[in-house]
Every structure is written in C-alpha cells, then in structure tokens.
Amino acid sequence: MSSLSTKHLLGIKDLSAEDINLIFSTADNFKDVLNRQIKKVPSLRDITIANLFFENSTRTRLSFELAEKRLSADIVNFSASSSSVSKGETLIDTVNNILAMKVDIVVMRHPHAGAADFLARNVNARIVNAGDGAHEHPTQALLDAYSIREREGSLTGKKVAIIGDILHSRVALSNIFCLQKLGAEVMVCGPTTLMPKYISSLGVKVSHSLREALSWCDVANMLRIQMERQDIRYFPSLREYIQLFGLNMEILNSLEKSITIMHPGPINRGVEITSEVADSSQSIILNQVENGVAIRMAVLYLLASGLN
Amino acid sequence: MQKRLLLDLTHFEITIKRLCCQLIENHNDFSNSVIIGLQPRGVFLAHRIHENLLNLTGIKNIAIGELDVTFYRDDFRRREINSPSKTHINFAIADKKVILIDDVLFTGRTIRSGMDAMLDIGRPSKVELMVLVNRRYSRHLPIEPDYVGIQVDTIRSEKVKVEWKETEGKDAVWLLSE
C-alpha cells in the first residue's frame, strides 16, 4: 500500500494500523532527508498550505511550518488574534476566503473539539487537525509512537503509561488510539478529578498511583496540567500534585528497570517532571521534537498525493 | 500478453562484462569515481557492475551508493505513488565522477529526478549514465546514456522487464507486448 485510506487527518481514530505504518515508513525517508546538507525536497512545490491557528502554539506550529518548507510547499500563516475572526467572522467564511486564494491543504488548530471534522465536511480542501480542543492531536500521537518505536524497536507488547491531566488532554486521547492500534498496552495515571469518566471504556488500565504506573510501564509519557482549560480547581494545591504525581530522579532511580521518559511539551519544569529527569539520558523529549518534522512531512506528502 | 527474450543468461553476463570493461577504460583505478544505483531496480545493476569491477580490476574498494528519487519525481499526484526506498550514500560525491546507473532508460524522467536528487547531496565534477536497456525514440527529455547494455526500439504500449537472479531467480531481459 502506498496511499492513506483517508482524505484528511482528523484523528487517529480514523486511521488503520496500515496507515500509521505507511506514515512511519515515509517519515523514515524524510528523516534521512533532514539529516542531509540540503534538507529539502521539491515534492510539494505546486501545493499551497494554510496554517490556521485559532489557539496558541509554538512547537506544533513551527514543526508544521518547517515540514511544509522542507517539502517546498508555499505557505500562508494565520493566527486568530490578528485576524477577522475577532471581528465576528465564522469559521467556514474564514476558511472559504482563504481557499478562494487557491489553498490545497489546511492545517488547523482550534479550541473546540470537532472543529477539524466540521471543516472537512464543509470546505473543499485536505484538512490536517493540529489539535482540536480536548479531542485529538493526531500528529503528536504519531510522533510519540514513532519515537517509542525508534527507541524500543517496536510498539507491540510495549507498556506505555500516560501520566498527568488526562481529562483536558487531546494528546492522551490520540496517544491511546495510536498505541492500541500498534499493539501497545496503555495505562493512564493521574488524580481522579483529572480522569474522564469514559476512560476505562477505551480499554486502558487506570491508576491513581505514580509509583504503580512507573513500575508497570516501559515508557512514561508525562503530560502537563492544562491550567488554561481548567475552569474549576481539580486538586487542592500544586504542591500536593507535585508530591503525588511529579516525576523526579529519586522515584526513577528507585525503579527496578530503566524506563523511557517522554513529554509532548510545553514542560512545566518542577511540576510534572523535574529538570533532572527531563534532561536525563532516559528522556527522549528532544527526539520527539526532531521526529515531529519528519512525521508531519510524511502526513502532508501522503495527503497531497491524493490531490488532483 | 506476448513475451520475447531480449537477453538470455549468457548474453546478460557478456553484456555486464562489456559494460565493466568500458568503465575501466574511462575510469582507470576508480580513485575519483563513485557508482550510484537508482532505487528500486537500478541498484541491482549497480551492485552487479560493482562486484564484477572488483573481480576484474583487483581494486579493493570502489564507492557504491543507492539513491531514491521518489520525492523528486515530476509525476507526483499524476499517478499512484510508489513507496519510497532508502537512499544510502555514505561518501561525499563533491568533485567526484559519478556513474549513475539504472536498469531501463525510457522517457528520461527518472534520470532527471535522479540528477536533481543527487545534486542535493553534492556537486560532482562529472556525471555519466549507464543503463542495461536503452529504449530508443521514446525520450521526453534530452537525456542520453554513456554506457548501454542493449538498444531496443519499442512502442509505448510495450514494456521491458529486467529480471535479476536476486529477485526473480534468473537474469534475463524480456520485451512484453499486449
């Protein structure tokens, strides 16, 4: 198989394991390109991509932008704060106006779950979801799984613990779908209040003890507390959260095995993870960022191959 | 589907030997020359040539690499895409004489992509092209080979298939027609 089964990348839920493996094998080739002196290929030179960010982003936005430039696509950037959205324009109007300028692919981050899906049904362009509310963040899950595969050799049978604010995390949901499709086992861990009610129906193990999760897993993916999405207080104090769920060198060294540490960023050093752990040899946080560009190049390349 | 044998095992070997001799005439001790086979099927010819050159000349080391051109093709989105193969070039090609190798030369578009891909890796002093089969009068671009195994005159609906013992079990070149 050399093309994806979907026209858009809205979520990992729509992808098959074959799709994910195709993205990974294509990303392998792009990773080679990124290590050359000329880190660029001409594949998408006749494609225009709009990056629509209705929510703040540093890493994802930069990563997409670099991926697009490495593929020689023309790009336009848009952020909600400096646009007509603040004047009351609807999402479809905004996007259709951009598409009227002959844009082929739209990469969108939006604070509302389902925004990417809504767009895919209403406008004539390939849509890549760069995060929609607390729903999905498919490219992050792909680069996380790709980084685990790179470190551990394979995902099959691997035990991955996702630790932190699961309730508000689109990374957690996409990671669960992606890891399960590739044959890994998933445990989520965090305070009861930051755990969605439906979580056990996704076929994951649930724990409220950091030590239990760390002893069980081969890989720990640490998530930050998403303060900006929290309308009420979910735990008594940050100090208590750090004591119960903060990952430090002492806990890591007390484990009987060496586990791999991941973090999708941005890191709140000293909260969910100490600087010592984030910068340790067990951490693959910067590999995740590096792999992000190759994964996004692969996704854009494969989606563009279906455009006429 | 009709099949006509263009090159049998004996002639296949003779052709490979002849191509090697032509290379030796032009490249002496290969100290400033490198061989690059185009993925996916040009690499078989490249490795066969490389192996024969080592045996014929007694030289211990001739640089050989594999180049994938998928991301440089000009027919991306015009037809089903092929999964990319690996590029393995672990030597500098700057200021080297590159012998670019593919199995069949047809429209010339793959070679054009190959040259673009190669120039992104470095700037060789000279590039030569070797093909096992040259399908004449079918070029879309002004590209001609320097070393040719066999010349064939074909029409567009015909196909040339090169079989390798590594993949198909035996060496042969076939002309397939409807």
Image (spheres, rainbow, N blue to C red):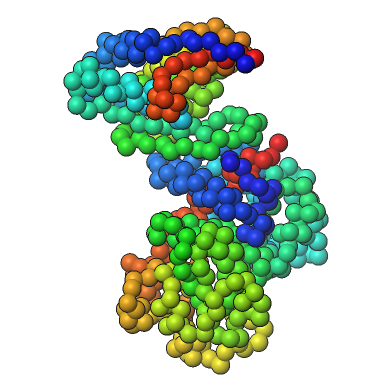
In the displayed structure, would residue A78 be above or below residue A210?
above
Which residue: 61% across, 77% down?
A200
Residue A198: tell me if it is visible. yes
Q: Is residue A198 left or right of residue A188?
A: right
The x, y position of residue A119, in whole percent, is 76, 56
**Which of the image's four quarters has the C terminus of chain A?**
top right
Indicate the quadrant where residue B51 lies.
Answer: top left
In the displayed structure, would residue A178 be above or below residue B64?
below
Residue lying farthest to the front in this orientation: B169
Viewer-closest of A92 and B51: B51
Which residue: 57% across, 70% down?
A172
Viewer-closest of B66 and A198: A198
The x, y position of residue B174, in whole percent, is 50, 14
Residue B129: tell me if it is visible. no
All told, the count of numbered labels is 0
Which residue: 65% across, 87% down?
A232
Viewer-closest of A306 and A88: A306
The x, y position of residue A115, in whole percent, is 73, 62
Q: Is residue A19 left or right of residue B164?
A: right
The x, y position of residue B25, in whole percent, is 27, 10
Which residue: 61% across, 29% down?
B75
**Which of the image's four quarters has the N terminus of chain A?**
top right
In the displayed structure, would residue A8 be above or below residue A202?
above
In the displayed structure, would residue A114 be above or below residue B13?
below
Indicate the quadrant where residue A149 lies.
Answer: bottom left
Indicate the quadrant where residue A175 lies.
Answer: bottom right
Residue lying farthest to the bottom in this orientation: A236
